[in-house]
Amino acid sequence: MKKYILIIVIAFVSCLGLSIFLARPKNVGEEINYPTNIIKIKLEGAIVFPKEYSVISGTKLNEVIALAGGFSEDADTNKLNTNEVLTNSKTISIPFVAQYLREKVNINTAKFEVLLSIPYITEQKAASIIIYRQTYGYFKRIEEIVNVKYIGNATFDKIKDYITI
């Protein structure tokens, strides 16, 4: 009787082992293919979380904007194609409403996001303007902006029509 029980147990364990072997995933040990068409999209301007995002080529702009927390409340989206399919790495500046109204930006009171709406003002330059204001006080003339780190005469010539004090 013990012989029959032993044979049944061996048969059962063999069947169990065979079923586990056959049920295993077929691609165990195979290399996983990750997407190689990753592009970098840098969002700046009127966006909640402006920064660089890594996405798969073919992603729509509205999907990247959703990753960035959406538009800020003062974003001007009228001339923006949010259904644009992104295929190459690039920087996209989301304009502020004031940018299209051609209102001049007060460099003494403007917040970081508003400073970014000035053409040719990058995040680094906007931060430098704020640091300069905190260190030296308000600008007395717009020409004084050339004293700010990363802003020289060439940048001033490009932005002078967009700024005021």
Image (cartoon, rainbow, N blue to C red):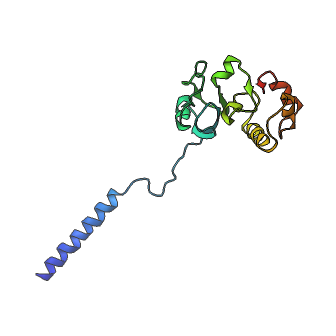
Q: Quadrant of the C terminus?
A: top right
Residue 137 in percent (x, y) is at 80, 39
Decide if residue 112 is on the left or right side of residue 129.
Answer: left
Q: Quadrant of the N terminus?
A: bottom left
Residue 99 in percent (x, y) is at 68, 22
Decide if residue 93 is on the left or right side of residue 163.
Answer: left
Residue 9 in percent (x, y) is at 20, 74
- Which image quarter: residue 91? top right
Residue at the right extreme of this rendering: 153
- Which image quarter: residue 126? top right
Instruction: Give the residue displayed 60% in from the left and 26% down from the top.
Output: 75
Residue at the bottom extreme of this rendering: 2
Give the camera-side residue of 41 and 38.
Answer: 41
- Which image quarter: residue 17? bottom left
Residue 118 in percent (x, y) is at 73, 27
Total numbered labels placed on residues in the image: 0
Q: Is 8 above or below relative to 140?
A: below
Decide if residue 91 is on the left or right side of residue 23.
Answer: right
Instruction: Give the residue displayed 74% in from the left and 39% down from the top.
Output: 130
